[in-house]
């Protein structure tokens, strides 16, 4: 005898009052319902129902049995539903890591859209600018802007991330617009300090098909790229700002791109995850969703034509 099925049928019969109505709900016959209840009674050695041709009412033993099994049955049914959901890979936790700006600007809208489609999948977002070891930190998926990733993880290139030299219109009105790298060296500039080394990053240019790195004197250096961007927006100086941060204010006219023919496309935004054969389906669903939404996106990346149209 299938005890779970028999107990479920018993509880349904107690709630509905007749075997006929149970049969309608379970898409079976009243005779089959009666047989199931009779087998359960024989199994328990108890009479659970007083039966008439029109109605079935619980005996005292049946009432006590109902009070004992119904709460447990509801918990068991819920557990079975959760287990089935896990098999379908639509429940559980996905742990994601990213740098601060990537997390706030790129991922938060993505995560919101993902949960609209998979509301039973929970998300844990860890924002930090260092490169996270996914395995040791029990993370599922990472997002990083920068150079191509090493062979220890699976990496997917999503879109190019440019380093755009830019300034506020107010700064340019006061100090003039540099037309060359030599001109740029005479201006007030901002910088980004690498969290890992504490060193100010050189600016990056692409000239004649070659990548040139140039150390820049700066009036402000920050270890937070968003803080540097806000300093540039405030007119403190010229900055080389990544396109994830700079794309929106450039398109809005709050920043002006400079020396646009030297912008490098060497870096990109990468999604990465551990090499494993037992990846949970919910993680695979998230990876596939992120790639479908972000790969080739132009929201945070500007073409050479667009940069030229925004320059002065």
Image (spheres, helix red, strand yellow):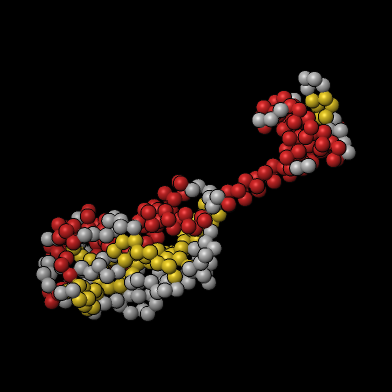
Residue 107 is situated, as x and y percent measured from the top left of the image, at: 40, 57
- Relative to 205, residue 95 above or below: above
Image quadrant in which the N terminus is located:
top right
Depth order, front residue of 263/277: 277
Farthest residue in the right direction?
A: 45
Q: Please identify the quarter of the rendering in which residue 166 is found.
A: bottom left
Q: Is residue 65 left or right of residue 225?
A: right
Q: Is residue 138 above or below residue 251?
A: below
Residue ID at (44%, 58%): 287
- The image position of residue 292, as x and y in percent, is 37, 54
Residue at 21% from the left image edge and 60% from the top image edge: 303
Residue 139 versus residue 74 in the image, above or below: below
Can residue 231 be seen here? The reply is no
**Location of residue 180 by image quarter:** bottom left
Q: Is residue 37 left or right of residue 113?
A: right
Q: Where does residue 291 sit, x and y in percent of width and height?
A: 38, 57
């Amino acid at each position: 005898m299938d005890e779970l099925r028999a107990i479920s049928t018993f509880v349904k019969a107690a709630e509905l009052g007749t075997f006929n109505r149970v049969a309608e709900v379970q898409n079976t016959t009243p005779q089959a319902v009666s047989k199931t209840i009779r087998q359960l009674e024989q199994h328990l050695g108890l009479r659970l129902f007083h039966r008439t041709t029109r109605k079935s009412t619980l005996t005292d033993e049946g009432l006590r049995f109902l009070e004992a099994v119904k709460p447990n049955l509801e918990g068991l049914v819920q557990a079975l539903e959760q287990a089935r959901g896990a098999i379908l890979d639509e429940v559980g936790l996905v742990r994601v890591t990213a740098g601060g700006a990537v997390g706030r600007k790129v991922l938060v809208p993505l995560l919101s859209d993902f949960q609209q489609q998979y509301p039973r999948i929970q998300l844990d977002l860890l924002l930090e600018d260092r490169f996270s070891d996914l395995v040791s930190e029990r993370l599922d998926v990472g997002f990083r802007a920068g150079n191509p990733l090493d062979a220890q993880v699976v990496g997917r290139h999503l879109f190019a991330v440019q380093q755009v030299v830019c300034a506020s219109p107010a700064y340019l009105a006061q100090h003039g617009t540099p037309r060359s790298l030599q001109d740029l060296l005479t201006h007030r500039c901002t910088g980004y300090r690498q969290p890992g080394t504490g060193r100010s990053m050189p600016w990056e240019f692409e000239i004649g098909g070659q990548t040139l790195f140039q150390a820049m004197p700066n009036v402000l250096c920050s270890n937070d790229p968003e803080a540097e961007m806000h300093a540039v927006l405030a007119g403190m100086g010229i900055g080389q700002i990544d396109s994830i941060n700079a794309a929106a204010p450039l398109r809005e006219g709050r920043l002006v791109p400079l020396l646009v023919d030297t912008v490098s496309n060497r870096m990109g935004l990468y999604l990465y995850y551990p090499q494993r054969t037992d990846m949970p389906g919910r993680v695979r669903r998230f990876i596939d969703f992120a790639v479908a939404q972000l790969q080739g996106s132009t929201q945070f990346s500007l073409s050479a034509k667009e940069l030229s149209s925004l320059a002065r």
